[in-house]
Image: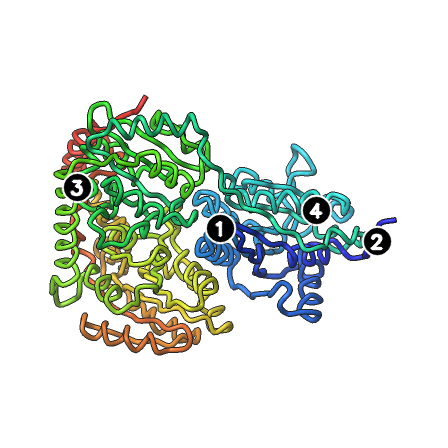
Amino acid sequence: MTDTTRLTVAQAVVRFLSVQYSERDGIEQRLIAGCFGIFGHGNVAGVGQALLESELRDPAALPYHQARNEQGMVHAAVAYARMKDRLSTLACTASIGPGSTNMLTGAALATVNRLPVLLLPSDIFSTRAASPVLQELENPTGYDVSVNDAFRPLSTFFDRVWRPEQLPAALLGAMRALTDPAQAGAVTVALPQDVQAQAHDWPDELFDRRVWHVSRPVPEPAALERALAVVRSAQRPLVVAGGGVIYSGATQALRSFAEATGIPVAETQAGKGSLPYDSPLALGAVGSTGSVAANEVARDADVVIGIGTRYSDFTTASRTAFQAPGVRFVNINVTGLDTAKHAGTAVLADAREALHALTDGLAGWSVDAAYRERNAQRQQEWDAVVEQAYTRGHGPLPAQSEVIGAVNDVSDPRDVVVCAAGSMPGDLHKLWRTRDPKGYHVEYGFSCMGYEIAGGMGARMACPDRDVYVMCGDGSYLMMAQELVTCVQERIKIILVLVQNHGFASIGELSETLGSQRFGTWYRYRNETTQRLDGDVLPVDLAANAESLGVRVLRASTVGEFRKALVQAKSESGPVMVHVETDPLVPAPSSESWWDVPVSEVAELESTQRAHEAYVRSKAGQRLFL
């Protein structure tokens, strides 16, 4: 007879999660390294009670971390998973109703970025005895519908545990999805609040240590041969390295491949760091926020080898980046959806394994010397542009590029820069000199304002031996700064670089480009004369706000003061903010590419009319690859 242990559903969940491990290349690590949680009536007596018992029994079994915002805790878990190359993540538990739906944005961000996170939203009563309970959505189409059904399209796996007997299958399905590189994203197991507290006799083997093996699929021989034939025919090939190169641990394999073949490498946002910035084969960022070097090569490339990329509109400059007649694509990815894009030659495989196979298959083949030399020259020319942006000497307020340059200079090679939204991600993509594969952490799949601080916290939790620089504008700070309190509470050191430019700088610049004159993007008083938001600058002091939350604050007015403050920040033991005001009207160097944002076809404003004319001209360059 099978031995059993009587536990509640919530206690069984916590005990199960504490003994799950992932393994790749013979290295094992905790799959669920801890649990973020905010408690309410939906989970305080269920998962909350279970976490308390677990902590009292063994604090290391499933460490609990107190969050301040449910969206923020999902962002932190996602950042943790990214730094761990998708091999380890955190769970997030929330109460019924708004607590759970607050996690929806985090779920979308995780799935868009193909990063695993486990969500445990509380749910309505399974018995319906007390319905409608507080915060329950009453849907006339069916009594089994709850707000948590909104997680279904945002999750790569979703289940709701109506009865205790359903829990083992739900948990095993969740772990399978979390450890499948092709299915990475939000994994949601909804737990009705009454079921969480129900007791059940569980088979003891449910709580045995379990290791989930993360596969490295190798290329199918026929697919590999097709890819090799396309690459051998190329005269101007280009690699586009995406996040899959980083997550696969394939950076050394990519470097060997590029050096052997002479094929230059351009990087997406998630793939930045695939090669060190100073490699002669590293062209830097590609696409709408890319370097001139990468975009020049992309325009003329006759073969594009996409490795671990999903070809977002920024990466492809809204399908205007690749202009050579008859350009062909070789797409290497663990996700079938991505291998078929742009009518490419599909190679369904792990990035590292595919690169090894390509390198072996192309032994003795290389681009011609002139192409190799010209691309090395392009790399040097672009680095000179970066240096000029770092040291432009703008005043009286510094330019944002000078702030980036100072952080890059002061930070150590293994330190991490974190960002997500606004003008900063585009500038970082162009200008940041990456020296380590994990040193660049910009969330640009969902580009979610408010990710920065929570993401920086999660990144630091995953790599406590690295300093983490969170680059955040005033707009993103005002969206979500609450996790600074968690950083203070847990003594998690992040260096928050708060760039104050009194508005939405990125959308302001975009608005001006599109003929909308930065409307609605300044932080200003309403003008009593014009009745518009074009009055004086608001007297908002975000540094004082951070200080009130327990954060050490350093203020800087000039680039020189800013550099000194950064050096001082490195010596701090807890979270620290370095506050600097910048000039939002100084652009970064042009990428000489385009991003498709439609402009009004009919307008009274002359600025909008001119913008629409420019839009029509640029849109003529869009291509469908069939």
Q: Secondary structure at mark 4?
A: loop
Query: Mark on residue 3?
Result: 2
Q: Position of residue 246 (x, y in %)?
A: 39, 49
Q: Which mark is residue 180?
A: none
Residue 86's disc number: 1
Q: Circle 4 sits on which residue?
A: 132
The residue under label 2 is which amino acid type?
A: Asp
Q: Nearer the viewer, mark 2 or mark 4?
A: 2
Q: Residue at x 27, y 75 (%)?
A: 565
Mark pair 2, 1: CA separation: 34 Å
Image position of 391 with respect to 258: above or below = below
Counting from the top left corner in percent of width and height, residue 531 is at 26, 53
User: Which comes sooner in the sequence, label 1 or label 4?
Assistant: 1
Along the polypeptide, which appears first: circle 3 or circle 1? 1
- Distance between mark 3 and mark 1 Cα atoms: 34 Å
Q: Looking at the image, can residue 356 be seen?
A: yes
Tag nearer the camera, 3 or 1: 3
Quote the CA–CA distance across marks 2 and 3: 66 Å
**Mark 3 or mark 4: whose residue is earlier in sequence:** 4
User: Do labels 2 and 4 touch, CB within 8 Å?
Assistant: no
Residue displayed at 44% across by 36% down: 349
Which quadrant of the view contains residue 474?
bottom left
Tell which tag, 1 or 4, sits nearer the viewer: 1
Q: Position of residue 469 (x, y in %)?
A: 34, 65
User: Which residue is at a point 32% across and 48% down the rendered structure image?
Assistant: 269
Q: Which residue is mark 3?
A: 372
